[in-house]
């Protein structure tokens, strides 16, 4: 039985930030006869848009680190170490940029390979009719439904998948998505699938770990990476949601700790209001995910999006 794989847009962030070894193995699997990767015109557009947004975030990081520090560099607390802190900020930006450039090159190659080998579940000409069907489906209060965001990608893809597997494609479809509009309604969607298709099964998966396991890709170090990233996300969240002196002080503290993007470690900085706390977990995931990608995930993580809840 064939294994069909549909990777939703929101899963690609995890692919961009993972290790070189896993990406290499993924590219090998893309050429395998064991798996059939599925895509659609609307999914392709969303993936390319998402990829560009991920890596454009790096420009935001670089500009704002120096901008925020400029607000407080004249204060006596930082005047003695002004040259060291400024230099460390520049090193952080430079190392992050190098790291991001490598990851972007890797992402471009992987996405290109995926788009080349994936099988389309519908054509451009069919999208107008699918959109009309998606709107009709939503009027009947059926999920997945993203119409409130003026985004019909999910219902279009779901309707197209149902149609595709009615054409006697036998096997198991694995849908990888973090989208709650799928994951909250797995039972009803599975029932619809089973009543609409023959000789096919469907499974919904929520994590990149499950993707690596299905593709028989090595997951050594995965749990440590996830833990480190969660700690870094909390750090960045405190830094970039703080205001005034608190945010600037956090940036200064990060720089005072030294560069950690491509290196070994840097102290965690947590800004709360006008205060600053140094110490805590290491910023180890930055060497894996990159500062820009981590911030992008913080700003765009679908699990933090109330519209998906």
Image (cartoon, grey):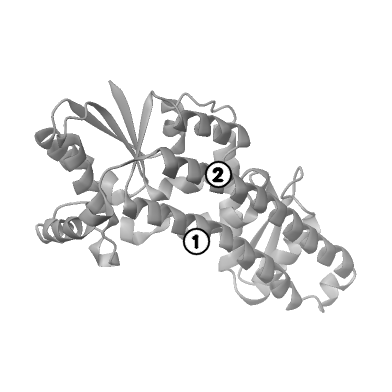
Q: Position of residue 240 (x, y in %)?
A: 59, 66
* Dot 2 alpha-carbon crowd within 10 angstroms: few under 14, some 14 to 19, many 20 or more: some
Asked if 104 appears above or below 251 in the picture, the reply is: above
Q: Quadrant of the C terminus?
A: bottom left
The residue depicted at 43 percent of the width and 33 percent of the height is: 211
Q: Nearer the viewer, residue 298 or 190?
A: 190
Q: Is residue 279 left or right of residue 80?
A: left
Q: Residue at x 11, y 59 (%)?
A: 136
Q: Which residue is mark 2?
A: 109
Residue situated in front as seen by the camera: 168 or 46: 168
Q: Is residue 129 above or below residue 6?
A: below
Q: Is residue 130 positioned above or below 249 on the image?
A: above
Secondary structure under the numbered disc 2 in the rendered image = helix
Mark 1 crowd level (few <14, some 14–19, many ≥20, 10 Å Cα): some
Q: Is residue 217 visible?
A: yes
Q: Position of residue 13 (x, y in %)?
A: 49, 48
């Amino acid at each position: 039985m064939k294994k069909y794989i549909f990777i939703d847009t929101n899963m690609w962030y995890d692919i961009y930030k993972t290790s070189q070894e896993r990406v290499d193995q993924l590219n090998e699997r893309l050429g395998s006869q064991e798996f059939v990767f599925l895509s659609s015109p609307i999914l392709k557009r969303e993936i390319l848009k998402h990829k560009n947004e991920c890596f454009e975030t790096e420009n935001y990081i670089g500009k704002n680190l120096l901008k925020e520090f400029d607000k407080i560099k004249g204060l006596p607390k930082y005047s003695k170490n002004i040259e060291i802190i400024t230099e460390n900020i520049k090193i952080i930006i430079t190392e992050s940029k190098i790291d991001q450039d490598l990851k972007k090159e890797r992402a471009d190659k992987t996405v290109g390979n995926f788009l080349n080998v994936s099988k389309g579940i519908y054509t451009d000409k069919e999208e107008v009719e699918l959109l009309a069907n998606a709107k009709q489906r939503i009027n009947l209060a059926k999920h997945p439904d993203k119409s409130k965001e003026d985004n019909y990608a999910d219902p279009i893809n779901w309707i197209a998948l149902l149609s595709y597997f009615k054409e006697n494609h036998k096997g198991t479809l694995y849908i990888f998505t973090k989208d709650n509009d799928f994951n909250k309604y797995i039972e009803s969607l599975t029932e619809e699938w089973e009543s609409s298709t023959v000789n096919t099964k469907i499974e919904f998966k929520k994590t990149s770990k499950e993707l690596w396991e299905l593709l028989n890709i090595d997951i050594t170090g995965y749990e440590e990476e996830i833990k480190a990233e969660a700690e870094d996300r909390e750090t960045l969240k405190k830094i970039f949601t703080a205001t005034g002196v608190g945010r600037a002080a956090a940036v200064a503290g990060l720089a005072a700790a030294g560069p950690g993007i491509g290196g070994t470690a840097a102290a965690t900085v947590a800004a709360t209001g006008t205060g600053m706390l140094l110490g805590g977990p290491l910023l180890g995931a930055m060497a894996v995910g990159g500062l820009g990608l981590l911030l992008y995930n913080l700003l765009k993580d679908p699990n933090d999006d109330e519209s998906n809840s």
